[in-house]
Image: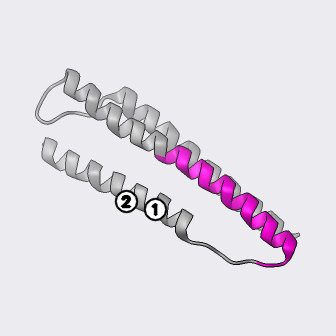
Amino acid sequence: MREHLANERTLLAWVRTGIGLVSVGFVVERAGAPAFGTPGGRETVLASGVFGLALVVLGCLALVVGAVQFFRNRRMIMAGVFAPKSAPYIVVVAGSLLLAVSFIVYTALSR
């Protein structure tokens, strides 16, 4: 019973993270990140759209990874065997780091 409840809590954490990323992506897309030295215009819309879309895609990826891991872990718990895999988590972490570094570089160059 404890393993199933822990698996469910982990799924809910993935859902919370995915929804948070998607929400921030919508905010960034709508807010309009400043473009390289321009006060507004097409470049601003393009930059905020790219970063917003990237956050939404990363959030959707987190939701899919969480669901896949939940069902995989559920099957293993029911079978009495558990072999953790880190590859799905590394994909989400690497995507998050890549997006964060891209945003930091973009922000530094736009000042």
Q: How is the image coloured?
A: one colour
Q: Amino acid at mark 2?
A: Leu
Q: In the image, is residue 98 part of the stretch drawn in magenta?
A: no
57 vs 97: above or below:
above
Task: Tell me the tag on residue 93.
Answer: 1
Q: Amino acid at mark 1?
A: Val
Which stretch is magenta? 58-81
Q: Quadrant of residue 8?
A: bottom right
Q: Can you give x and y, in whole percent of width and height, for residue 51 in the image?
A: 34, 39
Point out the residue furthest to the top here: 41
Task: Tell me the tag on residue 97.
Answer: 2
Label 1: which secondary element = helix
Q: Quadrant of residue 1?
A: bottom right
Neighbor class of circle 1 (other Cα within 10 Å; few <14, some 14-19, many 20+) is some
91 vs 36: above or below:
below
Q: Quadrant of residue 54?
A: top left
Contact check, label 1 and label 2, Cβ < 8 Å? yes
Give the position of the C terminus as an image quadrant.
Answer: top left
Q: Residue at x 14, y 36 (%)?
A: 36
Q: Residue at x 80, y 65 (%)?
A: 75
Q: Residue at x 43, y 43 (%)?
A: 55
| Nearest the eye: 96 or 87 | 87
Q: Is residue 60 left or right of residue 24?
A: right
| Nearest the eye: 75 or 46 | 75
24 vs 89: above or below:
above
Label 2: which secondary element = helix
Q: Residue at x 64, y 55 (%)?
A: 66
